[in-house]
Amino acid sequence: AKANERKQGWLGYYWAPTAILGTYAMVKLDAGVPYDDKAFKSCNTKADCAQPARTDWAKSEVLTVITDRFKKAGGPAVDT
């Protein structure tokens, strides 16, 4: 938040979707390579990986769960 207020750059990893990503303008950095499931699972996720490979992050399915009460209340959060 302070970097945004100061108009300073910020570099980090953030899981989406979250309120933070809805609040601040963020840009996904291009890894320059597609996701490689084999490289990711065979070496990159192991602490002693001798030759980690460049790979983008995997895409994950995101599910949103709300209560009936929240849904019936309506509003912008339910409309999206």
Image: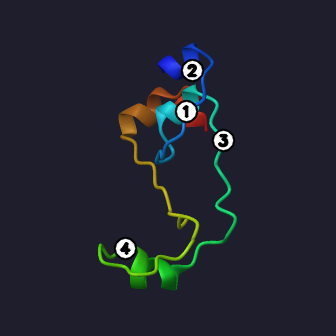
Amino acid beneath label 3: Val
Q: Nearer the viewer, mark 2 or mark 1?
A: 1
Disc 4 to disc 2, C-alpha distance? 32 Å
Tag 2 and tag 1, C-beta contact below 8 Å: yes
Q: Is residue 79 left or right of residue 13?
A: right
Residue shown at 53% from the left, 77% from the top: 53
Q: Which residue is mark 4?
A: 45
Residue 16, horizontal then vertical, whole percent:
50, 46
Most extreme residue toward the top is 5
Q: Which residue is mark 1?
A: 10
Residue 13, horizontal then vertical, whole percent:
48, 47
Label 4 residue SS: loop
Amino acid beneath label 4: Thr
The quarter of the image holding the C terminus is: top right
Q: Along the polypeptide, which appears first: circle 4 or circle 2?
A: 2
Q: Which residue is mark 2?
A: 4
Residue shown at 68% from the left, 56% from the top: 30
Dot 4: few (<14), some (14–19), or many (≥20) neighbours within 10 Å? few
